[in-house]
């Protein structure tokens, strides 16, 4: 028995396969085709955002995530992909918020829950690291003068040799 999956399902599947193989231009092409056929499916622009970002198109990635969230603000894939995009673009606060939202909608014990927890842990670890770095910032102006002093002491040592 043959089940006709439809062109958007085939294009979506091909796009995901291309993402896994890191063929990002092909992934963009196939996911855009799937979205054109079914613009109401939130998972399509969610995954398309990953393909856009991987192919060096962060503005399109943001727009795709925004479309996905507008279509399904409580969807797992839109929240997860919004978190991944925020993480990759350095917005740790938003990444944490999006991963928490994805975790809340994931089915307990599911692989999706495991993925959301893993990304949330990575984000929180980076947040802790950034707090540590921010705590060092007040000391940086003092350290910024260090090379000048070292340069002066070298000059003095060279003068002493002469």
Image (cartoon, helix red, strand yellow):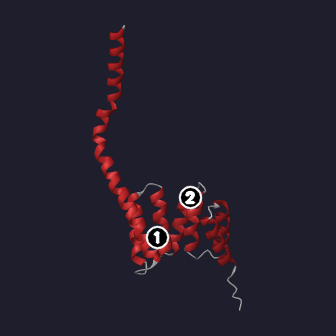
Q: Can residue 74 be seen in this view?
A: no
Q: Can residue 87 be seen in this view?
A: yes
- Residue that extends furthest to the bottom in the rendered view of this protein: 1
> Secondary structure beneath disc 2?
helix
Q: In which quarter of the image is residue 118?
A: bottom left
* x and y percentages locating residue 6 in the rendered image: 69, 81
Residue labelled with disc 2: 53
Q: Do the residues bearing badges 1 and 2 touch, measured as CB atoms within 8 Å?
A: no
Residue labelled with disc 1: 79
The quadrant in which the N terminus is found is bottom right
Q: Quadrant of residue 5?
A: bottom right
- Comes first in the chain, label 1 or label 2: 2
Q: Marks 1 and 2, how far apart in space?
A: 16 Å
* x and y percentages locating residue 155 in the rendered image: 36, 16
The quadrant in which the C terminus is found is top left
How many numbered marks are there? 2
Vertical placement of 8 versus 156: above or below? below
Q: Residue 5 carries which label?
A: none
Q: Residue at x 35, y 57 (%)?
A: 127
With 151 as the anchor, is 50 left or right in this view? right
Q: Which residue is drawn at 32% across and 56% down?
A: 128
Crowd band around label 2 with a 10 angstrom C-alpha radius: few (<14), some (14–19), many (20+): some
Crowd band around label 1 with a 10 angstrom C-alpha radius: few (<14), some (14–19), many (20+): many
* x and y percentages locating residue 107 in the rendered image: 43, 81
Vertical placement of 22 versus 144: above or below? below
* x and y percentages locating residue 32 in the rendered image: 65, 67
- Residue that extends furthest to the top in the rendered view of this protein: 162
Front position in the image: 34 or 158: 158
> Secondary structure beneath disc 1?
helix
With 133 as the anchor, is 55 left or right in this view? right
Q: Which residue is drawn at 33% across and 15% down?
A: 157
């Amino acid at each position: 028995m043959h089940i006709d999956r439809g062109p958007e399902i085939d294009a979506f599947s091909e796009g995901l396969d291309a993402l896994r193989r890191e063929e990002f231009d092909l992934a963009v092409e196939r996911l855009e085709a799937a979205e054109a056929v079914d613009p109401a499916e939130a998972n399509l622009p969610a995954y398309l955002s990953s393909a856009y970002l991987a192919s060096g198109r962060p503005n399109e990635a943001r727009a795709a995530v925004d479309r996905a969230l507008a279509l399904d603000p409580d969807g797992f894939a839109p929240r997860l992909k919004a978190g991944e995009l925020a993480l990759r673009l350095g917005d740790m606060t938003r990444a944490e918020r999006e991963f928490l939202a994805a975790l809340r909608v994931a089915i307990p014990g599911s692989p999706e829950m495991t993925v959301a927890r893993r990304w949330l842990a990575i984000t929180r670890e980076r947040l802790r690291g950034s707090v540590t770095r921010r705590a060092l910032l007040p000391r940086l102006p003092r350290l910024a003068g260090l090379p000048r002093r070292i340069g002066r002491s070298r000059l003095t040592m060279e003068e002493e040799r002469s």
